[in-house]
Image (tube, rainbow, N blue to C red):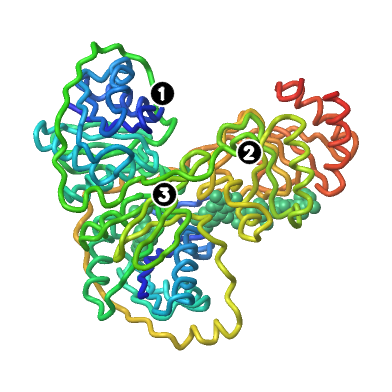
């Protein structure tokens, strides 16, 4: 049996959980899901529709919003009771956090961000995990009778595999301090504009923009074609743009139809965030810049003289 | 407030990763070293908290003895002292690293109020060492923090989820793992660099238990060069770019 930790936000299932179920299904038909907290029952049907043959819903009056250690405690109880061969979750901040707690509670190894998992005979599993934000793959053997792993987002496709809905509820037994750290409030909201992660077009600037002022041009382009503005880390560390706009390994990962990179060199850590773009166009004075190796189209020119010309034509074309 | 910050020395990759001949490690003969941006933000946060509240910042690094260079760089922006755990070339996995970090923290003469770490290391990206350290020390842990305020012994932490932020509060002592974007790390000043040279670095030796996740080989995923079409320069390229945008359907 394989246990999948199902991640949800107040009853809304995280899509990477379905990818985790499909990854687990490829290893064993007996995939069971565990889901905890307020709204947990609401996601059971969807989990079954993707192949979870049994859904364990953990209840506790104190578990309403996300409570990482308590969730791990619930998973841990099921592991002790049912001895699954593996526990798998989505490679998201919450998925990694809950399985990190589980691994710490049991002092077991934890293979995060896997892109491939095979259960070998005995106590070993052959995995491939992403390092450096996916720029390097680590082919490794995990030795444990309980494999604890998360799957990197989008590494596995979620495929429906209708299982009849079977839900069982259980009371979560908490230990001291399990609810000390939990979501207590939410602040800020989706204030206008297109969210960077979901944007169809990302217009991104790097050091070549030479300061915050030239970003007005990128905002203008994004405004005309309905995209979001992104940037490199050089730009956020200089304080030219907010960190929320940073694309890359330690920023946001984007997968737009078009990524327009203006004055960005193409460091591996930046590419880690934009390599899923369908089309990448680079504007750079240097035709040998590394970004050109990832580009579909290049304009070898100075952003300060080229972008005003382009904006004029773009506006004319969109009228 | 006495703060420990766990930092890891990692190679600074350029535009391509080159592996050693046995495919077991990154070839670092031609690259420099640095820290993950997450950890740079952790040090900045610690230095700022101590500027405001008094106290001390202790850096803890497990790795190559040459990591002293990265330690001195962070001392130059204000960290006071450091513990360097020399692995003699070995690379501890997160379980072993957490054990050594927790031992260093609990056996130190300072009673730390706060342990700051990165949410994930730049190279390994295990996303777990902070949580393991917290369990070993019997402390609460908040992860992936992008906003941090401390008042009367309570840390208020924010974590980004989509376009909103979750708020957590936790009493100190605690472990908090942070993300790039928490702040903008300052640059070292010349006097800061001078002072850093004289700050104490305790060097320790630790032996590590064998890992239960063993690498067979590392692989750099092949990314075929797309052979970019050159649209030229100036007005001509501007016209061509508009055409391309129409073709790929982002401009109607
Ligand atoms: C662990 C780690 C994580 C990191 N995470 C990230 C991350 O998430 N995101 C990120 O972006 N970086 C990240 N970095 C930093 C990364 O390594 C690079 O330093 C950064 O991406 C470089 O930004 P850049 O391309 O804007 O600047 P540069 O590398 O300086 O490139 C500037 C480019 O602009 C071109 N140019 C200059 N002037 C003009 C002009 N007038 N017109 C047109 N072109 C011009 C130049 O030819 C050059 O190619 C990380 C680093 C580390 C160590
Ligand atoms: N060798 C090390 N020395 C010091 N700190 C470390 C080391 N390895 C990991 N850490 C800390 O643990 C965090 C998470 O690492 P990881 O679990 O590998 O993603 C890092 O950002 C560091 O703060």
Quarter of the image containing the N terminus of chain A? top left
Q: What residue is rendered at 38% in x and 57% in y?
A: B177
Q: Disc 2 marks which residue?
A: A294
Disc 1 packing (10 Å; few <14; some 14–19; many ≥20): some
Q: Do tags 2 and 1 sit on the same chain?
A: yes
Disc on res. B167: 3
Query: What is the x, y in percent for residue B12?
Result: 52, 59
Are discs 1 and 3 less than 8 Å apart at CB?
no
Tag 1 secondary structure = loop
Tag 3 secondary structure = strand
Query: What is the x, y in percent for residue A22?
Result: 33, 23
Q: Do tags 3 and 2 sit on the same chain?
A: no
Task: Looking at the image, tell me whether mark 2 or mark 1 is earlier in sequence order.
Answer: 1
Nearer-the-camera pick, B84 or B133: B133
Q: Give the chain letter at badge 3.
A: B
Q: Give the chain letter at badge 2.
A: A
Is label 2's Cβ within 8 Å of ligand 1? no
Name of the residue lying farthest toward the bottom? B198
Query: What is the x, y in percent for residue A83?
Result: 11, 33
Q: Disc 1 marks which residue?
A: A157
Tag 2 secondary structure = helix
- Cα–Cα span, label 3 and label 2: 38 Å
Left/right placement of residue B249 relative to residue B242 reads left
Left/right placement of residue A234 relative to residue A224 reads left
């Amino acid at each position: 049996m394989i246990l999948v930790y199902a991640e949800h936000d107040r009853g809304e299932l995280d899509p990477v959980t379905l990818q985790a179920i499909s990854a687990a299904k490829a290893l064993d038909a007996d995939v069971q899901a565990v889901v905890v907290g307020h709204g947990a029952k609401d996601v059971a049907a969807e989990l079954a529709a993707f192949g979870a043959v049994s859904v364990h819903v953990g209840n506790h009056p104190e578990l309403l919003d996300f409570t990482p250690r308590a969730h791990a405690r619930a998973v841990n109880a099921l592991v002790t009771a049912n001895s699954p061969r593996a526990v798998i979750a989505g490679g998201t901040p919450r998925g990694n956090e809950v399985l990190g707690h589980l691994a710490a509670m049991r002092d077991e190894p934890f293979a995060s961000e896997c892109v491939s998992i095979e259960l070998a005979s005995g106590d070993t599993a052959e995995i491939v995990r992403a390092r450096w934000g996916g720029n390097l793959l680590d082919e490794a053997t995990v030795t444990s009778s309980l494999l604890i792993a998360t799957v990197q987002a989008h590494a596995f496709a979620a495929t429906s595999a209708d299982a009849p809905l079977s839900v069982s509820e259980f009371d979560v037994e908490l230990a001291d301090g399990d609810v000390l750290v939990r979501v207590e409030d939410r602040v800020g909201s989706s204030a206008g504009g297109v969210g960077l992660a979901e944007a169809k077009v990302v217009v991104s600037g790097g050091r070549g923009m030479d300061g915050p002022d030239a970003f007005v041009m990128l905002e203008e382009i994004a405004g005309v074609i309905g995209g979001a503005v992104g940037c490199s880390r050089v730009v956020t560390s200089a304080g030219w743009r907010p960190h929320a706009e940073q694309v890359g390994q330690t920023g946001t990962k984007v997968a737009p139809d078009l990524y327009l990179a203006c004055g960005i060199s193409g460091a591996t850590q930046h590419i880690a965030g934009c390599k899923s773009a369908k089309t990448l166009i680079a504007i750079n004075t240097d035709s040998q810049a590394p970004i050109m190796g990832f580009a579909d189209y290049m304009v070898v020119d100075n952003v300060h003289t080229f972008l005003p010309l382009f904006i004029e034509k773009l506006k004319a074309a969109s009228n | 407030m006495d703060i420990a910050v766990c930092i890891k020395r990692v190679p600074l990759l350029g535009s391509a990763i080159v592996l050693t001949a046995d495919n077991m490690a990154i070839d670092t003969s031609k690259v420099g070293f640095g820290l993950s941006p997450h950890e740079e933000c952790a040090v900045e946060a610690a230095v700022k908290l101590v500027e405001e509240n008094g106290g001390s910042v202790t850096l803890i690094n497990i790795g190559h003895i040459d990591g002293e260079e990265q330690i001195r760089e962070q001392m130059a922006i204000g960290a006071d002292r450091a513990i360097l755990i020399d692995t003699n070339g070995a690379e501890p996995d997160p379980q072993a690293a957490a054990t050594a970090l927790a031992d260093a923290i609990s056996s130190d003469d300072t009673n730390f109020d706060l342990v700051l770490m990165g949410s994930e290391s730049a190279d390994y990206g295990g996303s777990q060492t902070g949580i393991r350290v917290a369990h070993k020390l019997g402390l609460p842990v908040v992860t992936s923090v992008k906003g941090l305020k401390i008042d009367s012994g309570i840390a208020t932490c924010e974590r980004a989820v989509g376009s909103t932020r979750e708020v957590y509060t936790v009493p100190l002592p605690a472990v908090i793992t942070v993300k790039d974007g928490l702040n903008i790390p300052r640059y070292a000043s010349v006097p800061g660099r001078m002072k850093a040279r004289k700050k104490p670095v305790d060097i320790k030796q630790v032996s590590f238990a064998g890992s239960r996740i063993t690498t067979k080989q590392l692989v750099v995923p092949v990314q075929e060069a797309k052979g970019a079409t050159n649209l030229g320069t100036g007005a001509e390229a501007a016209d061509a770019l508009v055409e391309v945008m129409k073709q790929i359907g982002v401009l109607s």
